[in-house]
Amino acid sequence: DAKTTQPTSMDCAEGRAANLPCNHSTISGNEYVYWYRQIHSQGPQYIIHGLKNNETNEMASLIITEDRKSSTLILPHATLRDTAVYYCIVRVDSYGQNFVFGPGTRLSVLP
Amino acid sequence: GAVVSQHPSWVICKSGTSVKIECRSLDFQATTMFWYRQFPKQSLMLMATSNEGSKATYEQGVEKDKFLINHASLTLSTLTVTSAHPEDSSFYICSARGGDYGYEQYFGPGTRLTVT
């Protein structure tokens, strides 16, 4: 799997948008960008994923640059419950592939 | 999305004993299950991959005789930590894939093991 780089930590004010960047400059054409988060002492929670186009769901939006070398996860109105470690993972969607977790970004939402 | 459960959510055992952790897919048939380990303030590390009815494939550096994995049915995989030692204390997380969910992987809530 391609490697990703994320900032170690970020702060965000409650109610504001949280923009979490991820660089994946060596991504292959058939690799998807996935975002998961892990709240303390819980299992990872799926947030969103995409290939080329921007994606939006009830949790977040995913913006992927045209060259696909980077992406941004946007939490539009961060709450205290969004405090977690956010993992950006690139992966081919095939049965032989699993998720390789990097260190992620520790997001702290501040009151 | 699919639901994956783990039991127990936490366990304390004495050094030298064995402990079994269960991972269940509640609403789909998991053809593949994965076991991860996470030490404090570290990321998840894949330990092994198991396909239903087959022997597990272990990642480099993971002792297969110490971490016994059984995936005997499409909804249940178990991880047994044999002769546990304090250094095995960790957060163990399973994930499952299969059924109508295709390539997606769904994670369990994790099991915290403390070996005293």
Image: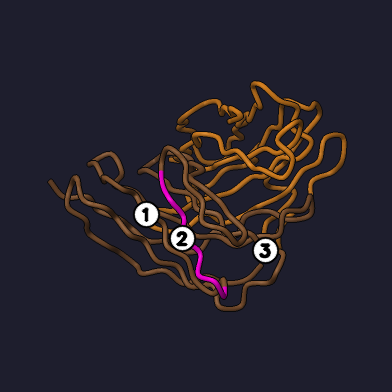
Chain colours: A brown, B orange
- Distance from Cα at disc 3 to Cα at disc 2: 15 Å
Depth check: give the residue in front, A78 or B18.
A78
Residue furthest out toward the right: B53
- Picture coordinates of residue A96, whole percent (x, y): 79, 54
Q: Which of disc 2 and disc 1 is earlier in sequence?
A: 2
Look at the picture and state if B20 lies above or below B65.
Answer: above
Q: Quadrant of the N terminus of chain A?
A: bottom right
Instruction: Report the mark closest to the observer, 3 or 2.
Output: 2
A81 with respect to B110 (left or right):
left
**Is B32 part of what is drawn in magenta?**
no
Magenta region: which residues? A60-67
Callout 1 secondary element: strand
Query: Residue at point 24% right, 53% down?
Result: A108
Query: Residue at point 43% right, 40% down?
Result: B116
Which subunit holds the residue at mark 3? Answer: A
B108 with respect to B57 (left or right):
left
Q: Amino acid at mark 3?
A: Glu
- Picture coordinates of residue B92, whole percent (x, y): 54, 42
Q: Which mark is residue A74?
A: 1
Looking at the rendering, which quadrant does residue B73 occupy? top right
Callout 2 secondary element: strand
Callout 3 secondary element: strand
Q: Which residue is mark 2?
A: A63
Q: Which residue is mark 3?
A: A31
